[in-house]
Image (cartoon, rainbow, N blue to C red):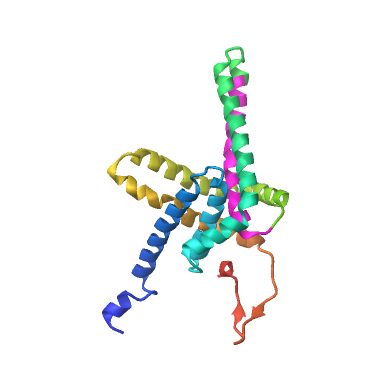
């Protein structure tokens, strides 16, 4: 094989990296478009993670096809959860602002309550970052998904905190770049954060993946699911 042929080979680390960067940009654009209706943001996050884990990390399938597949399959559960989370966040934020504006509230009590509400918002954020990947992977009832999400939130809180830190950093970076010529580079951030989050998240999900009987194809080769690599 010539040097040029080796360079353009799909196994070449440079080509693999370039392919992943392109896929991150592509899935980021799709994600942003699907977020426009606002109510679909939850399902868009679910589909973003699914694509980042299956296509970009494990090289299975195509970006738009897998995004659309996940979007259709998980729309109901993701949207219900998203609406509930938005309502809870609104109530918590309203309570924090009420404590700050209400002069009749004792300063000590108000500060403690505001701190409690803030902690609840952080825990809810970590829960949310667990729930959407869980929805993308497991076919569970809604309440089972929430219970499993809560379990992962407290049992693997460090993993969730790492992902939350990445999301916050990406948000701050986008805010700083907004309106500047370098804003273009923020386009890749949803896909990049989604891809990086698969490392702590997949570590958690694989622990609780149900065992399945090994199946074989016509040649006798074991059939493995993409997330079993």
Left or right: 35 in relation to 113? left
Left or right: 179 in relation to 229? left
Kindly identify the residue that appears in the image at 41 percent across and 63 percent down. Answer: 20
What is the magenta segment's predominant secondary structure? helix
For the question of whether residue 120 can be seen, the reply is: no
Asked whether residue 137 is drawn in magenta, I would say yes
Asked whether residue 17 is drawn in magenta, I would say no
**Viewer-proximal residue among 119 and 44:** 44
The residue at the far front in this view is 37
For the C terminus, the image quarter is: bottom right
Q: Which image quadrant for residue 2?
A: bottom left
**Viewer-proximal residue among 93 and 43:** 43
- Relative to 195, is 164 above or below? above
- Relative to 32, is 94 above or below? above
Kindly identify the residue that appears in the image at 50 percent across and 68 percent down. Answer: 61
Across and down, in percent, residue 141 comes to 72, 53
Kindly identify the residue that appears in the image at 33 percent across and 45 percent down. Answer: 183
For the N terminus, the image quarter is: bottom left
The residue at the far top in this view is 104
Q: Which image quadrant for residue 212?
A: bottom right
What is the total number of numbered labels drawn onto the structure image? 0
Q: Magenta stretch? A: 110-139
For the question of whether residue 180 can be seen, the reply is: yes
Across and down, in percent, residue 223 comes to 61, 77
Across and down, in percent, residue 187 comes to 38, 50
Kindly identify the residue that appears in the image at 50 percent across and 67 percent down. Answer: 58
- Relative to 109, is 179 above or below? below
């Amino acid at each position: 094989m010539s040097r040029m042929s080796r360079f353009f080979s799909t196994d070449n680390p440079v080509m693999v990296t370039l392919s992943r960067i392109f896929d991150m940009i592509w899935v980021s654009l799709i994600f942003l478009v699907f977020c426009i209706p606002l109510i679909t943001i939850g399902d868009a996050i679910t589909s973003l993670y699914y694509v980042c884990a299956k296509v970009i990390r494990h090289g299975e399938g195509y970006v738009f096809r897998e995004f659309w597949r996940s979007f259709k399959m998980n729309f109901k559960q993701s949207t219900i959860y998203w609406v509930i989370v938005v309502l809870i966040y609104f109530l918590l934020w309203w309570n924090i602002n009420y404590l700050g504006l209400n002069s009749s509230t004792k300063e000590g009590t108000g500060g403690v309550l505001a701190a409690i509400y803030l902690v609840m918002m952080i825990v809810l954020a970590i829960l949310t970052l667990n729930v959407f990947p869980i929805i993308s992977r497991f076919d569970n009832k809604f309440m089972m998904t929430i219970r499993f999400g809560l379990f992962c939130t407290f049992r693997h809180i460090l993993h969730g905190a790492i992902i939350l830190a990445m999301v916050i950093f990406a948000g701050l970076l986008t805010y700083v770049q907004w309106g500047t010529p370098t804003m273009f580079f923020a386009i890749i951030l949803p896909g990049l954060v989604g891809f990086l989050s698969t490392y702590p998240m997949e570590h958690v999900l694989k622990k609780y993946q149900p065992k399945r009987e090994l199946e074989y194809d016509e040649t006798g080769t074991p059939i493995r699911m993409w997330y079993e690599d």
